[in-house]
Image (spheres, rainbow, N blue to C red):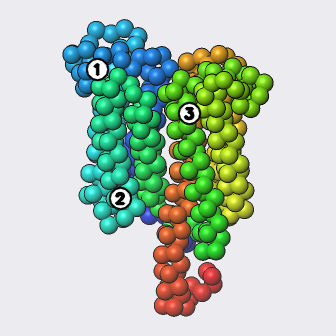
Amino acid sequence: MERPLSQIKPPIDKGVSNFRILTILGLIAVFIQIALGGLVRATNSGMACGDDWPLCGGQLVPAFNFEVLLEYAHRVSGGVLLILILIIFIYAWRLHRNNSWIFRSSLASLFLVIAGAAFGAATVISELGWGLRMIHLAIAEGVIASLAFTFVASLNFKEFGLTSPTQGAMASGIVYMSGMLLAIFLLILSGSLMVGLDAETVCGTWPLCLGTLFPQGDSRYSIHMGHRLIGIVAGVVMILAFLWIWRMREWVSGAGRIALVILILMIAQVFVGAVLVWTGFAPGWRVIHLAGGTLVWLSACILFATLFVSRETADHKETDFKHSNTSFGEFNSLK
C-alpha cells in the first residue's frame, strides 16, 4: 500500500546535511577551546610559551612539558576552530545566503572567531591581563551563541511539523528568554572576573562565605559572593523561563525537553560549584565548572534560537497552508 503524501518526507540534500554536521563540529570545537582555556588557566600554564604568538617559545613546534602541551593544544584548537568556521561561512554563502538567519549568524561567527584570535594574542603579549582574558572568554561564548543560531536555522522546521506561540504569548517569552541569556552570560563573566582578581579561593565555605554573606576586611570577599548572588538571580530567571517554556511546549516540539536539560544542568552547576569549594578549588573541578557553565549557555542559546527561528518558519507555513486551502478544496479536511 502506498503511503499518503503527508507521510512522505523529502530526502535531505547532501549539502544541507554536510552543513549541519559542520556546525555541530564547530560547536564541539569551540566547547573544547573554552574547556582547554579553563584548564590552561587552572594550571597556570598561560605563559608556558612565553609572550610569543603565534609561535611557542620562538618555535612552531616547541619542546613539550605538561604546561607547554596544554597551552600549545589550546592554540592549535583555536586554529582548527578558525578553519572550521571559515568553511561554515563559505558553505553558508554558497548554499544559504538567501537565509538571513544562517548567513548573518555564520558571518557573526567568523567575525567573532577572528576577534577572539586577536584578543588571544593580546592576552599573551600583555602577560595574561585579566581584562583581556575576560573579553577573550566573552567572545568565545559569543561564537557558541552565533553557531547555535546557525545550526538551528539549518533545520527544516516544516519537516518536523513545528508551530509557534501567538504574538502575545511570545512577548512574555522574549522577556524570560532574554533575561535568562543575559543572566547566564553575566554569571560566566563574573566568574572570569572573580578568578582574574584573585578572589576565587577567598571563600572556603559554601553557601556562606566564612559564616556570613559579606565578610568584612577584604574586597575580594564581595567579588566572590557577588558571583554567587548573580548565580542565584540567574537561577530564578532560568526557573521562570523554564515554566514559560513548559507551558508552551506544545507549540514547539522538543522545546520542553531542551528546557528540562537546561534546568538539570543548572542544578548540576550548583552542585559542582559547592564541590569546587569543598575540594579546595581543585583544578579539575574548576575546569568542570567552566565547562558546565558553557553547556548551560549553549543549551539556552539553542532554545532561544529554536523559539524564534521556528516561529518565523511557522508564520510562513501558516500562509502557505491558507493558500493551499483556497486552491484545493479537497484538502479542507486537513484543517
Asked if residue 84 shows in the view, the reply is no
- The residue beneath circle 1 is 51
Give residue 73's quadrant in the image. Answer: top left
Q: Give the SS element for disc 2.
A: helix
- For image coordinates 56% across by 33% down, the residue present is 191
> Which of the two discs, 2 and 1, labels the residue nearer the N terminus?
1
Q: Give the SS element for disc 3.
A: helix
* Quarter placement of the N terminus: bottom right
* Residue 191: image tag: 3
Q: Residue 161 or 85: which is nearer the viewer?
A: 85
Mark 3 neighbour density, 10 Å: few (under 14) some (14–19) many (20 or more): many
- For image coordinates 45% across by 41% down, the residue present is 138
Give residue 66's quadrant in the image. Answer: top left
- Judged by depth in the image, the label closer to the viewer, 2 or 3, is 3
- Judged by depth in the image, the label closer to the viewer, 2 or 1, is 1
Extreme residue toward the front, this view? 217
Under mark 3, the amino acid is Gly
Q: Is 47 located above or below residue 244 in the figure?
A: above
Image-based side of 37 in relation to 247, left or right: left
> Which of the two discs, 3 and 1, labels the residue nearer the N terminus?
1
Q: Give the SS element for disc 1.
A: loop
Point out residue 225 in the picture as x, y percentages from the top left corner.
66, 32
Point out residue 17 in the picture as x, y percentages from the top left corner.
39, 52
Q: Residue 149 or 96: which is nearer the viewer?
A: 149
Q: Give the mark count.
A: 3
> Which of the two discs, 2 and 3, labels the residue nearer the N terminus?
2
Give residue 275's quadrant in the image. Answer: top right
Under mark 1, the amino acid is Asp
Asked if residue 301 shows in the view, the reply is yes
- For image coordinates 34% across by 59% down, the residue present is 103
Under mark 2, the amino acid is Arg
Mark 1 neighbour density, 10 Å: few (under 14) some (14–19) many (20 or more): many
